[in-house]
Image (cartoon, rainbow, N blue to C red):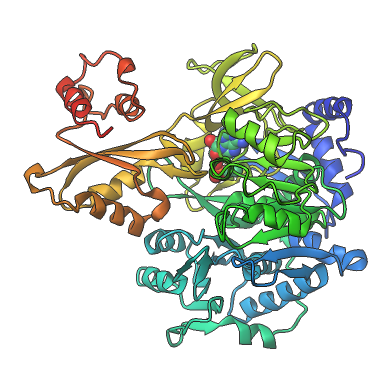
Amino acid sequence: MDKYNISTKDQYNSIYKDSITNPEEFWSEIASKNFIWKNKWDTVLKWDFKQAKVNWFQGAKLNITENCLDRHLQDNSEKTAIIFEPNNPKDSSEKITYRSLFERVCKMSNVLKEKGIKKGDRVCIYLPMIPELAISVLACARIGAIHSVIFAGFSSNALATRINDCGSRIVITSDGSYRGEKIIDLKGIVDDALSECKIVDTVLVVNRINSKINLVDGRDILLKPLLKNADKYCDAEIMDAEDPLFILYTSGSTGKPKGMVHSCAGYMVYTAYTFKNIFQYQPNNIYWCTADIGWITGHSYILYGPLANCATTIMFEGVPSYPDFGRFWDIVEKHKVNQFYTAPTAIRALAKQGIKHIIDKDISSLKVLGTVGEPINEEAWNWYDKNIGKNKCPIVDTWWQTETGGILISSIPGIIDSKPTFATFPFVGIQPVLMDSESNEIIDNDVVGRLCIKFPWPSIARTIWGNHQRYVNTYFSTFNNMYFTGDGAYRDADGNFRITGRVDDVIIVSGHNLGTAPIEDVINEHKNVAESAIVGFPHEIKGNALYGFVTLKDSSNVSDNTKDEINKLISDKIGPIAKLDKMQLTEALPKTRSGKIMRRILRKIAENDFDNLGDISTLLNPEAVEAIIKNNIR
Ligand code: WTA
């Protein structure tokens, strides 16, 4: 990344200017200098936000795995690509070299091909954070199959919905997973899910927890013997720049999850370039992102971005609290981590423990700290800066989304200063704007507005799998000719952006996006529930937690277990992450005269802010508000 390596503030300013004035030249230069292509593009960019059509590097041919693996073999075959750190610190970690990763990916590619998987087929991957997850993802990319990784904390129902939506006939899973002291029966969850997925004919099973695996005849196959016999070389499929690379589901405010589709070339170029610059990654640095590969952060900044830069990237199977809350710092000390990237919810959970788990650890290798997933509050920011960064590591507060593929707004260590709670400035090539409620662009500074991006960048999602119209409606219809992020933001007098949070009915709980409507739908399935409404309220560790207001059909028929039953239903149908922290049974929900639930008022009640309910006299049933306040659970 020569000419456009960002290493001073002046350089950032001039590169930024270039990237905006001549975006095509700019991205074309980055793409041609830093990657290997089978064929160069005919057109750098074609776009039309009205129809939500964006094409980058059209006509180019490539395979992303040749950029992440093959090209490093000549000089760096013995360099560690992935350090696998298992759940239990007593088990040894595993260093996978670029050579070995290449061979294991090729073997997996050959297994998939032998099972009849070919270019364009979808492959669902439901695995814990073990090397086979990375290898499966890359194997799909190698043969041109579209991977769809499903976070292994999702329930069977959520898994089935995603398998069916993308029409995958194969699932890669494991017998189980370790999470701290818990063992989770992943295979059992897959078996349940597949009773709803008739098209799945093959399940490849990794043996992780050494359990006795119940293999369904004719469908389930243990992966290990297949890999053992597979050839360690596999040609990379030649892909068009715009062929889909993967699908990754994200919650919408309504309806079923959205399968965001990312394509090969633009995604590769953008994730690699942002990784290198935002983390200021130098050869031989050890980089660790604590996310799960089930989320976009893991896709872009555990796998593709780092591997395209020939980096050493850590994959951690466990949780921050096992065997105790010092585990993260043990890992930093053990592997001499230089860049550490995590989420505010983890920082808050660790801060709550004080510094007893840090003082005896040598974490002096750290150079750059990152945060992502939700707004970081000032207290957590300061704790991170002082106790982990020792006031000498710049913090990159990176704002982005599943849909954006890579980081769009962030400081850059030593180049754009960090500012507590601010993501700060747009990365080069990114044109963020704030819009007011009349759909006008707000030009001034020191203002709040809805955050939009007015020009495409290479890793913008191309569509929602199977539903392009929903893509248009969700992201390109609110504001004319703009990509609407769904977030609100404040821009300070100097032009720094602070993301204030979602402006739609998505609530971010511990960094996970949860749409309220799908959870309400599940609650309403309970036989005694008439209706329900969910809102978020501030939570010390999770950032936000869920508060459910639930009206029963027959309130004389409330068993002690009703609330537990409702949470169990949510856990079974969506996953434990969507369980309600608080639940209040209500006689009725406040409604407008046109029958809409007044969530604004419920939000205030959940926040204990009874003085700012606004005018409730225009409601259809103001007495409902009074009753809710009277019975409020706090
Ligand atoms: C929020 C995660 C504030 C935001 C990469 C966004 C953030 C949503 C930040 C996307 C940040 C992400 N500061 N808010 N640094 N990063 N968000 O799709 O609301 O899981 O729209 O992608 O997380 O979440 P997603």
Q: Find ligand 1 in the image and state its quadrant.
A: top right
- In the depicted view, which residue is nearer to us: 271 or 568? 568
- Which of 52 and 95 lies nearest the eye of the viewer? 95
**Residue 633 sits in quarter:** top left
Q: Is residue 60 left or right of residue 120?
A: right
At 55% from the left edge and 17% from the top edge, which residue is drawn? 448
Between residue 22 and residue 177, name the one nearer to us.
Answer: 177
Number of marks in the rendered image: 0
How far from the left and from the top, in percent, is residue 542?
Answer: 48, 41
Q: Is residue 51 visible?
A: no
Residue 453, picture quadrant = top right
Q: What x and y, as percent, mark residue 586?
A: 18, 35
Q: Residue at x 80, y 56 (%)?
A: 311
What residue is at 76 percent from the left and 69 percent from the top?
95
Rendered-image quadrant of the C terminus: top left
Task: Check the image and name the residue furthest to the left.
Answer: 556
Q: Is residue 140 above or below residue 284?
A: below
Q: Is residue 108 left or right of residue 364?
A: left
Residue 467: percent from left, percent from top: 47, 48
The residue at 63%/23% (across/down) is 433
Q: Is residue 44 above or below residue 16?
A: below
In screen coordinates, is 130 left or right of 563?
right
Can you tell which quarter of the image residue 223 is in? Answer: bottom right
Residue 452, how many percent across, how many down? 59, 28
Image quadrant holding the N terminus, namely top right
- Judging depth in this view, the residue of 10 and 611 nearest the camera is 611
Q: Is residue 342 visible?
A: yes
